[in-house]
Amino acid sequence: MTGGQRPRLLLLHAHPDDESIMTGGVIARYLAEGVDVRVITFTLGEEGEVIGHRWAQLVADGGADQLGGYRIGELHAALRALAPDPASAPRPRFLGGAGRWRDSGMAGTPSAQHPRALVQAAHDDLVATLRAEIDDFAPHVVVTYDEAGTYGHPDHRRVHEVSIAAIAESRVQTGYPLKVYESVTARSALNSGLAAIGEIPDGWRMPEPGELPSYPDGVITTAVDVTDVLDRKVAALAAHATQVSVAPSRTEYALSNLIAQPISPVEHFIRTDGRVGADEGVRADTGSRVETDLFEGLR
Ligand SMILES: [Zn+2]
C-alpha cells in the first residue's frame, strides 16, 4: 500500500466458528502484520449441534434456544485468540446487528422455515445491508465462500450469493482493484493432511475418500502460509468448544460429527475478481505462479 494506507481485509462468514475453521490462519497472519481485519458473520449459529453435555441444553431444538447468544461469546474469544494483542482484536460483528438473521440449519430441516432464517430473508435486503458494510469499511480484499457453500449448507450458499451481488454494487474506491477470494480446501493439502494424522481420539473416525469437500489443485489461485500463527488458529478453534473439538495432538479437529479433519498450515483460495490475476496468469493449472499473499499486487 502506498501513502501510508493501512490494508483492509474483510471476511464474510455464515456462522461463528467458520471464520476460525476456514480462515483462522489468514486472520491471525494479517492481524500480526498490522492489517485492519473485519469479520462479518451473517447469523448467530443458533441451530448448531453442541458437543458434550455442559452446554447441550442451550440448543434450539428442544432446548433453551440460547445457543446463538452463547456463540457470540465463543466468537469473541476466538477473535481474541487470533490477535497478537487480545485488547486490539476485532470485535464480533453481525450482518444487520446480532440476531437480525437466524441460522437456517441444515438443508431440509424445519429451522429453514423460521421467519428470521437467513434463507427466508429478502435478497435485496441482504445485499443492501452488506453493501453498506462494504462501502463503510472500503476493503482492499474480500474473502467469501464458493458457490457450493463449502459443504452445501444453505447459509453458506446464501453468503456467497449475497457477497457477489453486494460486491458488484459496491462503490468502494481505494485506488486499487478490489480483490475477491473464495475460501476453499485444496485437494492435495487435504489428502496430505489426512495422511499425516496418527492416532485419533476415541469415538472419532477418519473421513471416507471424497467425504470432505475439496478442489483440485489446478483451480487454486492462492496459497497463504500460516505456519507462524498456527498456534493462534488452534486456540481459536478451541474457543468454539460447543462446535469444535481439537485433538490432543493439536493437528486435527472434529465437529459434532466426529470426523477427523487436518488443521492445515496453509490456507487456500480461489481468486474470482479476475481484474488483476486473470491477466497476469496467476493460475496453478498453467504452471504459473500461485499467489502467496492476499494483498499481492496491492503493496
Ligand atoms: Zn457455517
Image: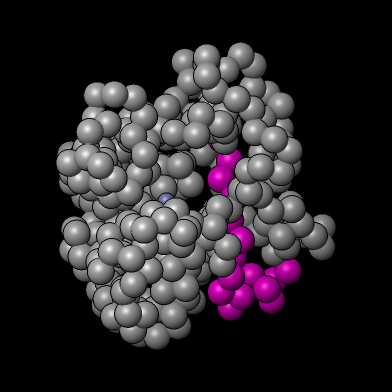
In this orientation, which residue lies closer to the viewer: 184 or 220? 184
Task: Examine the image and state in which quarter residue 9 appears.
Answer: bottom left
Pinpoint residue 163: horizontal percent, then vertical percent.
43, 72
Q: Is residue 255 above or below residue 214?
A: above
* In the displayed structure image, the side of residue 183 where residue 229 appears, left or right: left
Q: Is residue 58 above or below residue 144?
A: above
Residue 256 can be seen in this image: yes
In this orientation, which residue lies closer to the viewer: 177 or 143? 143
Q: Is residue 78 above or below residue 8?
A: above
Q: Tell me which colouring the rendered structure shows.
A: one colour
Residue 236 can be seen in this image: no
Quick one: quadrant of the N terminus? bottom left
Q: Is residue 299 above or below residue 134?
A: above
The answer to whether residue 279 is magenta is yes
Pinpoint residue 239: horizontal percent, then vertical percent.
31, 32
The answer to whether residue 20 is magenta is no
**Residue ID at (34%, 57%):** 111
Pinpoint residue 207: horizontal percent, then vertical percent.
65, 33
In this orientation, which residue lies closer to the viewer: 84 or 210? 210
| Highlighted range, magenta | 265-281
**Residue ID at (24%, 30%):** 55
